[in-house]
Image (cartoon, grey):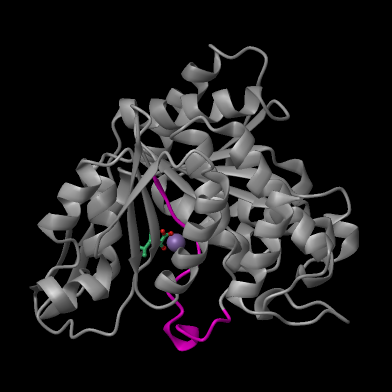
Amino acid sequence: MSKKVAVLPGDGIGPDIMAQAQRVLEAVDKDKIFEVTPAAIGGAAFEKFESHFPEETKKICEAADAILFGSVGGPIDQAHLPKWKNCETNSILALRKTFQLNVNLRPVKLYPALTAISPLKDSVIGNGTDILIIRELVGDIYFGEHKQYQENNKRHAFDSAEYDEDQIAIAAHQAFQAAKHRRGKVTSVDKANVMATSKLWREIVSEVGKQYPDVTLEHMLVDNCAMQLILNPGQFDVMVTANLFGDILSDAASAIPGSLGLMPSASLNASGFGLYEPSGGSAPDIAGKNCANPIGQILSLAMMLRYSFEMHDAASAIENAVRQALEAGYRTADILTEGARKIGTKEMTDAIISFIES
Ligand code: IPM
Ligand code: MN
């Protein structure tokens, strides 16, 4: 039976790097089992359908077994939209809500070949960095009420944050399950000294943790966690946290390997359906110039093969090929190291494909 993938390239460098990920998919799809259907999203969709997430795209996604997503953020007129609604919120947040994508997995891995481009000193990253950040994705302040209003001649604004125990438990289970296959440690990050949602978060994560006696659980306040990520990232194995904290901490952590262009992610719902996207943005300034780093998109494809299709060998083949290409000195502009030759998006993919096939 064929495996159906909805491919949503989006805006900016999205189409550039998505085209390369599709080449990699073809290279591992020896039996031609994948059926790929492209669909419009973001600014590119708005230009054609006057919607950032058109009905047609929704139907294609609903009919698919997984979604491979590029990036969004297009040059469009947003004058008619409320201030907190824009291309990104209308497309990616709508997808998360429509498919109830409960958790976002963001692995942060430092490649030995690239330690020179990490902003952190060798003495700090010396014992390696390999963190799996699990961000809750359908609750919190992201999906609360947002408003601006006028009162007593002053402008006010209001955002509400809410969690229910099931949302927290799903993220917690995901974290403990992942830790069992890694180094056996979960760091749950919250602001339980101040926020009610965080107090509930801590309570539920602790309860779920009792079901996983082999995994060590620690709680950390988010301000301290931000500091610890810079002082000693090697201490973290699996990190689990709420939507907004996860958004911020995952960007901070992604600076450690040296480039956002390297970072993949997977957003999964409770029944295992997934959307896979690189963490980097649409970078419209370098779009169409064959210079964006395709690795984040290619590793997102590997995560898709692993999580949606249980094709662990193909996923590992891609991940190993990326590591080999980096070890062999292939570098796009964002990860250039001394003495290395700069190559383009397509040439980096050529190198990765050649290692998959070797
Ligand atoms: C991300 C992005 C989104 C988020 C934006 C574009 C709404 O920053 O995927 O991390 O905040 O979740
Ligand atoms: Mn973000």
123 displayed left or right of 165: right
Is residue 277 among what the camera can see?
yes
Vertical position of residue 230 compared to residue 276: above or below: below
26 displayed left or right of 93: right
Number of marks in the rendered image: 0
Region in magenta = 275-291
Q: Which secondary structure type mostly characterizes the magenta part of the structure?
A: loop
Whole-percent x, y for residue 11 in the image: 35, 74
Decide whether residue 214 is among the magenta residues.
no
**Residue at x 17%, y 79% (from the top left corner):** 47
| Picture quarter with ligand 1 | bottom left
Whole-percent x, y for residue 139 in the image: 30, 43
97 displayed left or right of 59: right
For residue 236, what is the image quadrant? Answer: top right
Whole-percent x, y for residue 134 in the image: 51, 41
Whole-percent x, y for residue 78 in the image: 18, 81
For residue 152, what is the image quadrant? Answer: bottom left
Vertical position of residue 206 compared to residue 332: above or below: above
Which quadrant, please, contains the N terminus?
top left
85 displayed left or right of 247: left
Given the current orientation, which residue lies at the most extreme front position?
31
Vertical position of residue 69 compared to residue 270: above or below: below
**Residue at x 76%, y 42% (from the top left corner):** 235
